């Protein structure tokens, strides 16, 4: 036990001296922290379950750039009532304040409340435009039984009211013609005590011209949440594939080397067949014909990637096999399984670790490539799928860089961190293998 | 170099090809037969529309007879195993069947024509890329090997590590956004302009369309090559024969390109062919981003139109080229490395 501890300590000492390896390790720690704190980082908590559910994202603007890249444009925000007063049973009046100080109007104002509207409820809206007086949208009966949701820009009464102010402008441009403080008043007439209680949660979702940390895509999805949610899948795909693949490769290689003879010969024939199949095109056709899922993708990668390392493992294995301690062990009557597991595998373990880290980037790129052409697992959020959606929606043509750049950079960064770690491990391990 | 070795290696490659096509046939036979049946039904429908003055009974009879006849012709009545064997034979002889909805430029419905039409375009793009990346990688790698630890050397290894996890198609999307839409330097995809230019301009036009995909591939590709060449050359430069060559007063250039390069050439050639295999393995779908009409784009279009025969045809051709690459790799190795003898 103490030996193992000392070994790790020494290994760490060597590892620490390789700068790129440390950069990779720090990046990896950040990635793991992102996965752990994902619930706190997601701007929309149901991103994972409802990424492809358009109703979940309907209150977000479409194709909005990130807030930091679009200064001077209104960002998305949620307005809460500043004042709530009641007369009788019930005439509820709510006041909202929106400070408008931008060069373009927001895309829409959505009045929303997650509570079923009772029958015979009426709403009238008045908006005070700074320096221009008040406009009133005539009272109307709300559809009942469902939660309240009125997108103002698409409301015909509002549109008519705006047309009266300026018939030549689009309704939002007409409303936000002045900078300053807009006061919005809702007057609800109803006769339901519980609804009266619920009303103080009424909010106005301002659909900005800019949204969140990374903007939104053509399906109104919040890209920051998407990129954060994709992190864990990138790590899972990369690590699971790499670990299984390398274990298969190592055991295939040492078994082939240790037994030799016809076992070796036939195993090498199997290897030749596997290595002669172009994996990616094959994955395309299999995923197209059979229903694609993330585990099928991982399985296919595991079935093929091992071929990349088994040749080296076999060569090292042939060397180890000639060592005297193996002979001694055989002399004591050790079984071949014992020799493979207890003598040969531990010697190859450091090499295997380095290979695992180096295999992660390709696994992530393969999954992303499959997702790009629409063969990914649609029940999860991966960076490849975000990029695939960007590709078919013409994000490149429309220069929606906030949709194309972040997922790709994320893929590169994760791949890079593992490549750096693998390179550092390899630098430490390679000389040891040579002097074996 | 022994011709028997060459012949044996090629034969082994062909056998592996046959075996893999057999495996494909096992996996994809069911779904291919489904499309074949649908095609037959459609064909019968077409024929029946041309029938005149027939009773409904005759119609039904005609359909039955025709179906039996066509099933016989396409071996659909035989047991599963034999059908798979037939499928294997058909695939090896390039009889992939008819595409469901895709057409070749010459309006042919044969899956074979669609794929063979795309093949030269892929070869043009990827061999050009490999030649350029290979050359840059070779010279950069040798230069770095002379001064290991220098700034270019270290940045090359970092570049090589970063490019491992860099999807070529993503870089393609980014470059396209920059160079096709923001600064309108390059065409936005395809291989020809409309109208088609004539004479020398025809080829210049292809070059112009190929420029950005090529730049993207090279920008990603050369790092890894330079890194491999550098590692090979660094260890070769420590050998005794290099010291003795230097002691004899040979100029450094001769030591590097004459002695070192000759020693590492088998491994360097391997690298080149491995690059080719890598392109076929993973880079093919890159073509879709640039609408480059090659094998990779055929995968995209066939997927969109759910054209299974074309997909399988594309896969078989890709596999064939892939295996040719693997065989070529072995032959080059045997040719350049005299230690590898026939029969090994």
Image (tube, coloured by chain):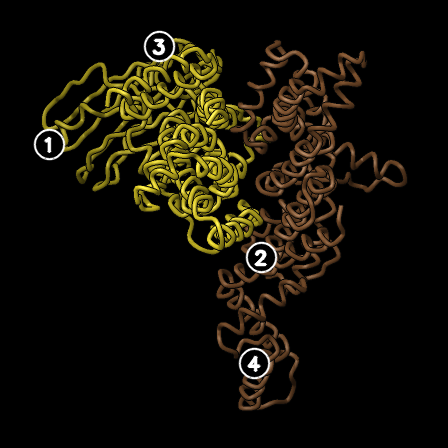
Chain colours: A yellow, B brown
Label 3 – label 1 distance at C-alpha: 32 Å
Question: Can the viewer see residue A292?
Answer: yes
Which mark's residue is nearer the viewer, 4 or 3? Answer: 4
Q: Chain of mark 4?
A: B
Few, some or many residues within 10 Å of mark 1 (<14, 14–19, 20+): few
From the viewer's perspective, is B46 left or right of A23? right
Res B67 label: 4
Res B312 label: 2
Few, some or many residues within 10 Å of mark 3 (<14, 14–19, 20+): some
Circle 3 sits on which residue?
Answer: A181
Q: Residue at x 58, y 20 (%)?
A: B159
Label 4 – label 2 distance at C-alpha: 25 Å
Label 1 – label 2 distance at C-alpha: 62 Å
Q: Secondary structure at mark 1?
A: helix
- How far across and down, in percent of the image, does residue A336 sit? 35, 46
From the viewer's perspective, is A169 left or right of B263? left
- How far across and down, in percent of the image, does residue B250 sit? 81, 14
- How far across and down, in percent of the image, does residue A186 sit? 25, 23
Query: Between disc 4 and disc 2, whose residue precedes?
Result: 4
Image position of B150 with respect to A310: above or below = above
């Amino acid at each position: 036990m103490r030996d193992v501890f000392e070994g790790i300590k020494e290994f760490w000492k060597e590892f620490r001296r390789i700068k790129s390896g440390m950069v990779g390790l720090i990046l990896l720690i950040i990635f793991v922290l992102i996965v752990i704190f994902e619930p706190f980082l997601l701007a929309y908590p149901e991103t994972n379950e409802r990424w492809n559910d358009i109703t979940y994202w309907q209150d977000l603007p479409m194709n909005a750039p990130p807030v930091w890249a679009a200064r001077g444009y209104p960002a998305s925000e949620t307005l809460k009532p500043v004042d709530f007063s009641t007369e009788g049973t019930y005439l509820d009046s709510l006041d909202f304040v929106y400070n408008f100080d931008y060069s373009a109007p927001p895309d829409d104002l959505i009045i929303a409340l997650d509570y079923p509207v009772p029958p015979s409820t009426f709403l009238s809206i008045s908006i005070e435009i700074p320096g221009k007086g008040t406009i009133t949208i005539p009272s109307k009966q709300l559809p009942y039984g469902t939660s309240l949701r009125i997108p103002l820009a698409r409301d015909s009464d509002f549109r008519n009211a705006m047309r009266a102010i300026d018939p030549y402008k689009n309704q939002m441009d007409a409303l936000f013609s002045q900078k300053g403080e807009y006061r919005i008043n809702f007057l609800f007439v109803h006769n339901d005590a519980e609804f009266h209680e619920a009303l103080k949660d009424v909010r106005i979702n301002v659909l900005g011209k800019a949204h969140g940390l990374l903007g939104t895509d053509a399906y109104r999805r919040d890209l920051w949440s998407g990129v954060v949610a994709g992190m864990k899948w990138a790590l899972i795909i990369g690590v699971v594939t790499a670990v299984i693949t390398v274990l298969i490769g190592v055991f295939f290689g040492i078994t082939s080397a240790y037994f030799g003879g016809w076992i070796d010969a036939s195993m090498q024939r199997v290897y030749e067949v596997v290595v002669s199949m172009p994996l990616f095109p094959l994955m395309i056709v299999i995923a197209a014909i059979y229903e694609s899922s993330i585990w099928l993708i991982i399985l296919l990668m595991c079935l093929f990637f091992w071929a990349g390392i088994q040749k080296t493992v076999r060569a090292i294995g042939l060397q180890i096999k000639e060592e005297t301690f193996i002979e001694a062990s055989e002399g004591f009557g050790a079984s071949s399984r014992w020799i493979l597991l207890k003598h040969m595998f531990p010697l190859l373990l450091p090499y295997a670790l380095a290979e695992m880290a180096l295999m992660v980037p390709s696994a992530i790129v393969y999954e992303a490539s499959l997702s790009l052409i629409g063969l990914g697992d649609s029940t999860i959020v991966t960076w490849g799928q975000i990029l695939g959606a960007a590709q078919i929606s013409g994000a490149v043509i429309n220069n929606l860089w906030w949709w194309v750049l972040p997922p790709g950079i994320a893929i590169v960064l994760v791949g890079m961190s593992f490549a750096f770690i693998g390179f550092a491990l390899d630098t430490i391990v390679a000389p040891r293998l040579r002097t074996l | 170099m022994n011709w028997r070795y060459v012949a044996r290696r090629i034969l082994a490659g062909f056998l592996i090809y046959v075996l893999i096509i057999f495996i494909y046939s096992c996996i994809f036979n069911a779904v291919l037969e489904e499309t074949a049946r649908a095609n037959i039904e459609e064909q019968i429908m077409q024929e029946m529309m041309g029938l005149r003055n027939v009773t409904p009974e005759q119609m039904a009879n005609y359909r039955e007879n025709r179906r039996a006849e066509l099933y016989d012709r396409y071996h659909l009545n035989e047991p599963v195993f034999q059908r798979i064997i037939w499928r294997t034979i058909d695939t090896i002889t390039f009889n992939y069947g008819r595409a469901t909805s895709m057409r070749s430029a010459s309006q042919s419905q044969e899956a074979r024509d669609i794929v063979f039409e795309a093949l030269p375009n892929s070869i043009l793009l990827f061999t050009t890329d490999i030649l350029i990346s290979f050359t840059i990688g070779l010279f950069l790698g040798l230069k770095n090997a002379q001064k290991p630890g220098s700034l270019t050397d270290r940045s090359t290894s970092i570049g090589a590590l970063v490019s491992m996890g860099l999807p070529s198609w993503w870089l393609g999307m980014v470059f396209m956004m920059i160079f096709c839409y923001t600064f309108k330097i390059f065409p936005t995809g395809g291989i020809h302009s409309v109208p088609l230019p004539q004479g020398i301009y025809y080829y210049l036009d292809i070059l112009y369309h190929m420029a950005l995909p090529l730049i993207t591939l090279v920008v990603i590709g050369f790092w890894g090559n330079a890194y491999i060449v550098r590692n090979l050359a660094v260890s070769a430069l420590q050998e005794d024969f290099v010291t003795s060559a230097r002691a004899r007063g040979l100029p450094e250039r001769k030591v590097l390109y004459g002695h070192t390069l000759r020693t590492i050439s088998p491994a360097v050639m391997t690298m080149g062919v491995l690059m080719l295999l890598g392109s076929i393995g993973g880079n093919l779908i890159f073509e879709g981003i640039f609408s480059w009409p090659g094998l990779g784009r055929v995968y995209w279009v066939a997927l969109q139109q759910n054209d299974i025969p074309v997909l399988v045809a594309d896969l078989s051709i890709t596999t064939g080229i892939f295996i040719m690459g693997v065989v070529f790799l072995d032959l080059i190795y045997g040719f350049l490395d005299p230690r590898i003898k026939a029969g090994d």
